[in-house]
Image (cartoon, grey):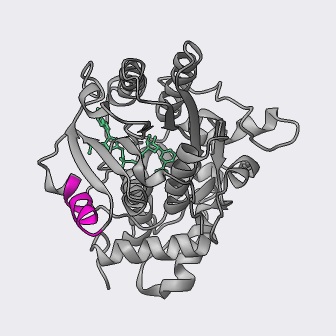
């Protein structure tokens, strides 16, 4: 599935930013399997929970891994790591939806200034010929209700998120301004090209227990009872992390790859996800069994979860979303069934004791 057969791929040297992350783990695994040299940047190369799995991966593969220290907000921090690289994959960006007080500092500044910082190093590094940016469908739309403004009721790569701000959906805003900055900087020169990967919500087994990714947190909450009383009628696009990683490799090494790529295997409500998990893991875990009526979500949701505002509920709960994934299929992405994604992801969560067996 999703094999890349580009001659010479194994001779490439690839920089991956945010190497400790959930998606980056799989990207690095595939690059090492192909025999690439991977320059992996992390904030703390001495932290075992960030890099232990990467070091083990490198021991068992034909590729070579080199670790570098770099923070998105440190000017020039990526320059040394980029030396000799032909491809730059920029995945690093905070993906947290709660637990912060200043959204600009927590999300927008690292995403925007970090992208600028990485691309300034690309401008100064003559060996780089392509940048693959991990963007998101968050840069395509902000709230589910945005779909009502689209006559085809389907989000495509032509659409941009115009509704998020630092105060409303700051994560979505951070991804939008970061991707826009990347295109602006790419268009200001002609040596390197840019391909963006715009995944919907990513699920599937994680190679690291250390990630703070909101993807992992959502499934843990489904299994540990925090959503026992029910879930809002919220629909997401979903995609397997392994398809997202393969898409990065395809985007890097297919010469004809260009532009933006929505990655979406299907659209599911939270209750449909819970149903898949209950079908596989039975009643041993307190997966939600019902949808909370929208008026109750509106009235009580913000009291239980301060990261969810009434404005968000009004603009998202009850609205379906649809995505056109044809550009990703043309790139070579083959989507596995979503049932496989969720059952394998929840099994990994159990194996890693993130939810205790009952
Ligand atoms: P993740 O596991 O939390 O990875 C994010 C990475 O960003 C971490 O490795 C983190 O490194 C790094 N990072 C954060 N702030 C940094 C800073 N100031 N300097 C340097 N590195 C920093 O999340 P993920 O889900 O893999 O997300 C990876 C990318 O995919 C992000 O760009 C995200 O927006 C995008 N994306 C994710 C999803 C999804 O559903 N998961 C969907 C669409 C797009 P540390 O180890 O140093 O903290």
Residue nearest the viewer, comparing 260 with 228: 260
Secondary structure, magenta segment, majority class:
helix
Residue nearest the viewer, comparing 223 with 32: 32
Residue at (43% x, 73% y) in the render: 346
Q: Could you tell me residue 177's position as x and y percent?
A: 52, 23
Q: Could you tell me residue 345's position as x and y percent?
A: 45, 70
Residue range of the region highlighted in magenta in the rendering:
51-60
| Residue 13 vertical position relative to residue 215 in the rendered view, above or below | above
| Residue 183 vertical position relative to residue 239 in the rendered view, above or below | above
Residue at (50% x, 36% y) in the render: 133
Q: Could you tell me residue 358's position as x and y percent?
A: 32, 85
Image quarter of residue 276: bottom right
Q: Is residue 175 magenta?
A: no
* Ligand 1 visible in quadrant: top left
Q: Is residue 52 magenta?
A: yes
Tag count: 0
Residue 320 in sight:
no
| Residue 242 vertical position relative to residue 314 in the rendered view, above or below | below
Q: Could you tell me residue 251's position as x and y percent?
A: 57, 45
Residue nearest the viewer, comparing 169 with 203: 203
Residue 99 in sight:
yes
Residue at (35% x, 27% y) in the render: 110
Residue nearest the viewer, comparing 347 with 180: 180
Image quarter of residue 150: top right
| Residue 225 vertical position relative to residue 109 in the rendered view, above or below | below
Image quarter of residue 225: bottom left
């Amino acid at each position: 599935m999703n094999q890349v057969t580009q001659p010479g791929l194994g001779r490439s040297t690839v920089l991956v930013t945010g190497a400790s992350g959930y998606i980056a783990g799989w990207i690095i695994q595939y690059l090492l399997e192909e025999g690439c040299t991977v320059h992996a940047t992390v904030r703390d190369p001495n932290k075992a929970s960030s890099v232990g799995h990467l070091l083990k991966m490198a021991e068992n593969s034909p590729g070579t891994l080199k670790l570098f220290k770099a923070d998105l907000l440190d000017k020039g921090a990526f320059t040394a790591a980029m030396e000799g690289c032909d491809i730059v994959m920029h995945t690093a960006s905070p993906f947290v939806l709660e637990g912060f007080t200043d959204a600009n500092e927590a999300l927008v500044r690292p995403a925007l200034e970090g992208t600028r910082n990485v691309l300034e190093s690309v401008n100064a590094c003559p060996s780089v010929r392509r940048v693959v940016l991990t963007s998101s469908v968050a840069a395509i739309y902000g709230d589910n209700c945005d779909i009502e403004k689209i006559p085809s009721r389907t989000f495509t790569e032509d659409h941009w998120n115009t509704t998020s701000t630092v105060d409303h959906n700051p994560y979505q805003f951070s991804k939008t301004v970061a991707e826009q900055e990347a295109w602006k900087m790419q268009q200001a020169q002609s040596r390197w090209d840019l391909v963006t990967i715009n995944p919907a919500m990513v699920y599937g087994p994680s190679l690291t227990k250390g990630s703070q990714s909101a993807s992992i947190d959502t499934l843990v909450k489904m299994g540990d009872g925090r959503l026992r009383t029910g879930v809002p009628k919220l629909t997401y696009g979903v995609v397997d992390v392994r398809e997202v990683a393969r898409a990065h490799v395809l985007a890097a090494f297919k010469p004809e790859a260009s532009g933006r790529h929505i990655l979406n295997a299907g659209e599911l409500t939270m209750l449909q996800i819970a149903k898949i998990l209950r079908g596989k893991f039975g009643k041993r875990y307190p997966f939600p069994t019902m949808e909370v009526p929208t008026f109750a979500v509106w009235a009580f949701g913000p009291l239980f979860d301060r990261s969810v505002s009434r404005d968000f509920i009004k603009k998202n709960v009850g609205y379906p979303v649809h995505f056109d994934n044809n550009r990703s299929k043309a790139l070579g992405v083959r989507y596995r069934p979503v049932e496989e994604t969720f059952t394998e992801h929840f099994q990994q969560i159990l194996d890693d004791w993130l939810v205790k067996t009952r």
